[in-house]
C-alpha cells in the first residue's frame, strides 16, 4: 500500500519547461497546444509550455525530463531550474479552469510549479506530440503573446536568465551547429538580447577572443557570397574566462 501511495501523481507540484531553439534566423520557443482527454468535446487551442504534475516518488529534475520527453519526444537534454512559481491565482483564468475541470479530480487545487529551461539546436531534435499535447510547434519568441496559466511569466523569467548567462558564459553555442558563420553567431546573440548589439563591435570583439577557430569550410546554398565558418573551442574559452572575459 505504501508503494502505491508513493507512485501517485502529486496534485500540488508540477514542472514546466522552457525550451529555446534557433533556426539560423530567429530565436524560437517550444510550445504545445493542449487537447482534452477521454474524448471530451471542449474546444481549446491554448498554447502552453511543456509541463505537467510530478509523481510523488520523483526527483524534480527527473520529473522535468520525463514530462518533456512524454509530451514532445525530446530526451537527454540539459535542463536547468529557473525558479518556483506559486501565485494563488496562477491557474484561475476561466479557459484554464474549463480545461482543468475536464481532466483533473481537483481542478481548483493550488499548484506550485518549478520552471526549467533548456537550449537546443533545432536541427538535432525531432519533436512529436504525445499525452495532452495536440500539436507541438517552434514559435518565434518575439511574437509570443498570451499563454495558458502563468506560462508567459515563466517564459519571461527564462529569457532574463538566458540573457544574464549569455553575458558571461558560452551558452549560445548550444543553439548553433558545430560550424557557424560570424553573422549567424551575431544574429543569435542579437535575437536573444532583443536587438541591442552593435554588429561591427560584436564581430571585432568575437574574432579577437581566441576561442573561435577558423575552419576551411564556407556556407553552402546561400544566395550571397558564402561566409567562412568558425567553430567554438571550449579549452580556449576556459583560458580566456579566467580573466573575467565578457562576451560583449
Image (cartoon, rainbow, N blue to C red):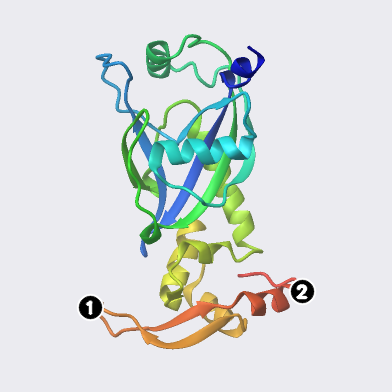
Residue at 37% x, 36% y is: 32
The circle drawn on residue 223 is: 1
Q: Element under label 2?
A: loop
Give the x, y percent position of residue 28. 40, 51
**Can I make out residue 194 in this image?**
no
Give the x, y percent position of residue 43. 26, 19
Rendering quarter of residue 205: bottom right
Rendering quarter of residue 101: top left
Q: Element under label 1?
A: loop
Q: Earlier in the sequence, mark 1 or mark 2?
A: 1
Q: Is residue 84 above or below residue 25?
A: above
Task: Please state which of residues 107 and 208 is positioned toward the viewer in this rendering.
Answer: 107
Q: Quadrant of the N terminus?
A: top right
Q: Is residue 17 above or below residue 171?
A: above
Q: How many marks?
A: 2
- The extreme bottom residue here reads 216
Residue at 47% x, 25% y is: 149
Amino acid at each position: 500500500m505504501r508503494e502505491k501511495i508513493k507512485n501517485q501523481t502529486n496534485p500540488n507540484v508540477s514542472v514546466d519547461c522552457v525550451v529555446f531553439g534557433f533556426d539560423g534566423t530567429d530565436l524560437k520557443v517550444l510550445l504545445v497546444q493542449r487537447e482534452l482527454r477521454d474524448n471530451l468535446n471542449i474546444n481549446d487551442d491554448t498554447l502552453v509550455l511543456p509541463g505537467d504534475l510530478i509523481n510523488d516518488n520523483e526527483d524534480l529534475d527527473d520529473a522535468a525530463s520525463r514530462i518533456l520527453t512524454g509530451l514532445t519526444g525530446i530526451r537527454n537534454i540539459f535542463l536547468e531550474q529557473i525558479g518556483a512559481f506559486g501565485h494563488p491565482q496562477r491557474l484561475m483564468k476561466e479557459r484554464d479552469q474549463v480545461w482543468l475541470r475536464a481532466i483533473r479530480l481537483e481542478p481548483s487545487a493550488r499548484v506550485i510549479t518549478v520552471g526549467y529551461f533548456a537550449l537546443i539546436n533545432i536541427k538535432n531534435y525531432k519533436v512529436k506530440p504525445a499525452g495532452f499535447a495536440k500539436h507541438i510547434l517552434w514559435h518565434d519568441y518575439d511574437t509570443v503573446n498570451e499563454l495558458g496559466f502563468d506560462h508567459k511569466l515563466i517564459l519571461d523569467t527564462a529569457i532574463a536568465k538566458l540573457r544574464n548567462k549569455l553575458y558571461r558564459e558560452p551558452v549560445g553555442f548550444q543553439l548553433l551547429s558545430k560550424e557557424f558563420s560570424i553573422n549567424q553567431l551575431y544574429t543569435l546573440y542579437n535575437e536573444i538580447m532583443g536587438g541591442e548589439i552593435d554588429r561591427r563591435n560584436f564581430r571585432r570583439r568575437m574574432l579577437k577572443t581566441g576561442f573561435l577557430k577558423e575552419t576551411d569550410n564556407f556556407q553552402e546554398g546561400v544566395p550571397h557570397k558564402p561566409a567562412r565558418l568558425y567553430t567554438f573551442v571550449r579549452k580556449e574559452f576556459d583560458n580566456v574566462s579566467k580573466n573575467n572575459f565578457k562576451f560583449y
